Image (spheres, coloured by chain):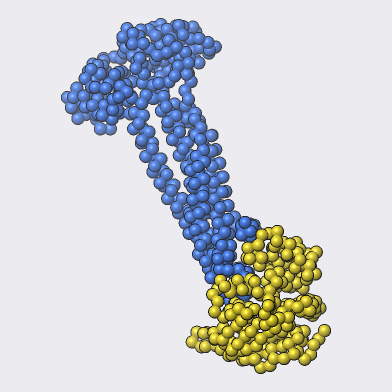
Amino acid sequence: MNDIAIDIRDVTRTYKMGEVEVHALRGVSFTVQRGEYVAIMGPSGSGKSTMMNVIGCLDRPSTGTYLLDGIDVSKLDDNQLAEIRLKKLGFIFQGFNLLARTDAIKNVGLPLFYAGLPARVRNERAIAALTTVGLGDRTHHKPNELSGGQQQRVAIARALINDPTVLLADEPTGNLDTATSADVLALFSSLHAEGRTIIMVTHDEEIAGNAARVIRLRDGLVVSDGPSGQKIA
Amino acid sequence: MPYLEEALRVLLGNKVRSLLTVTGLIIGVAAVIAIQVLGNGMAGAVSGALGTLNDHAFILFPNAQQGDFQRAAIRLGELDDIKATVPGVVEALPAGQARDLVHVGHAQYRLGVYGDSDQRFNIVPFAQGAAFTPQDVASKAKVCILTDAAYKKLFPDGGDALGKSIYIGNGRFVVVGVQAPPRTGILNATFGGDVAIPYTAYIAKYVRHGTIFAARFVLADDAPLTETEAAVIKRLRELHKNDKNSQYQTFDKASFASSIGSIFGAMTMIVGLIGAVSLLVAGIGIMNIMLVSVTERTREIGVRKAIGATRTQILLQFFIEALALSTVGCLIGLAIGLSIGWAVNNFAIVKLTGTVAPIPWVQATIIAVGFATVVTLAFGTYPAYRAAGLDPIEALRYE
């Protein structure tokens, strides 16, 4: 068992926007141990979204290597990346991104559908995941019948269902009010306490304060990497 | 099949749109299938209408368009000549009928009287008795055969008519046969009148000046129909000294059936063309909606990809959605088309012909399945391909 979940070495990412080359990442290196709770911070334009996409295997680095759970994913093709996302990553989005008109149990079971598991297994594990996030009694509710906080918890259950190496959250509280945000962050904390590896991208210092470690990006470079100073419970 | 379940949920989530999308397909499939059913019905109707006509027989009459039918009038002696000289002709007799008063007891009717032979032109089965004998024909016997309609008029109480006497004009004739009711309806081609008497008796009783308008010929079973018709016309024109005004035409079961067949062929082609056009229009409609759907669901596609769906899985999902749409459309079209065809067959064609054609299930199903397959493959592939090709980062950012 590899203790290092994420190992990023000299990763750059350059886009072409018409004639202009945009250097979104200019050489980023860091590692994340299993069980860590890391916040990635930075102002807009700092490269944190690109960092998120690379970590999430939605994008490939232009140069450098990225080992996820010991696998070099920087050279994989689209189908291989899809499989990595399916098996090693759990995404949590700012806008929840649940399927409309689809009840919680089906939303949560969707990754297992793509993994080719039968409906019975999907449903069993979806119920277990929903119970973990405290929604064991909402399995057949559709997104429009759930509050924002509940929807985000369904999304977290969906991210957990494959037992991923890393939970990847992109502004997970951005669409929630303060009280509900606190609930979701408490859920993250308890998942962290259970040993989950969590990477959270945010621009909010308070939210980032929940993580044990904060990596700050600016202009495509890591400007600081260390324990979060101001933990707000 | 979870993909199908997923597709149905999407389509049912937008019922009105789904239904409007497949309307073109429904109309196209329904039209083509209805015409198939009707074509079958009409083909059945033709064979039903001509079913009792002897395969080895034809009618010959002057061609009034190309010649002068007075000049072309056929004389009785010419019939005997043709019967003697043209190989394969076993019987030649006048084709006309005479309206005459027919009565039994006090009941009297004006009925069509025609001549018949022991060599039957029209092979309607008998309900009672049998055909004329060669002796009846040779001796101009005073015997008669009634059609079912005439029997019902003259013998309203039913019962055995054989041996009973009826009066035709002022002559007494003995009933030797009663024909079975015809299988066919309004288009009933009996090629005769109501009461048959031996054609020799008919000639003696009704033919004046030895000329007749048209003639019937019965051929030997092994005589080639078309060639014999040509030989009869050739001989007849010789007898008329090849006068350019003596032109003839013939009517027989085979040529009539083939001309009807070519009409259906043309009709089928036209409907096929309409079907192809409606297929195209319906397909474009489906493609359009699928493209709209892909655009609307860009973000959803991004999410699906982010959680691990492969390109193939997305492709399959949208492809199955298109397939479900066109399958539903084609099934509705199939049901409507069969219903229309069935209704027209059962309420209109049956009135004309008395026969109900069987529904061509196999053909209809093949058409519907074919339409669904072609539409899906031709018009569902591109939107699905586009969905599958979306970049997940762009898709997730889509508002």
Q: Indicate left or right for B393 with B94 as reference.
A: right
The residue shown at (43%, 35%) is B43
The residue shown at (62%, 70%) is B308
Q: Indicate left or right for A229 with B256 as reference.
A: right
Q: Is residue A80 above or below residue B7?
A: below
Q: Nearer the viewer, residue A79 or A19?
A: A79
Point out the residue furthest to the left here: B241
Q: Is residue B343 visible?
A: yes
Q: Is residue B26 above or below residue B284?
A: above
Q: Quadrant of the C terminus of chain B?
A: bottom right
Point out the residue furthest to the right here: A233
Point out the residue furthest to the front here: A1
| Percent coordinates x, y for residue B262 in the rendering | 37, 39
The residue shown at (65%, 88%) is A30
Q: Colour of chain A?
A: yellow
The residue shown at (65%, 82%) is A6
Q: Quadrant of the N terminus of chain B?
A: bottom right
| Percent coordinates x, y for residue B66 in the rendering | 25, 32
Q: Is residue A94 visible?
A: no
| Percent coordinates x, y for residue A141 in the rendering | 75, 63
Q: Colour of chain B?
A: blue
Q: Indicate left or right for B20 with A124 as reference.
A: left
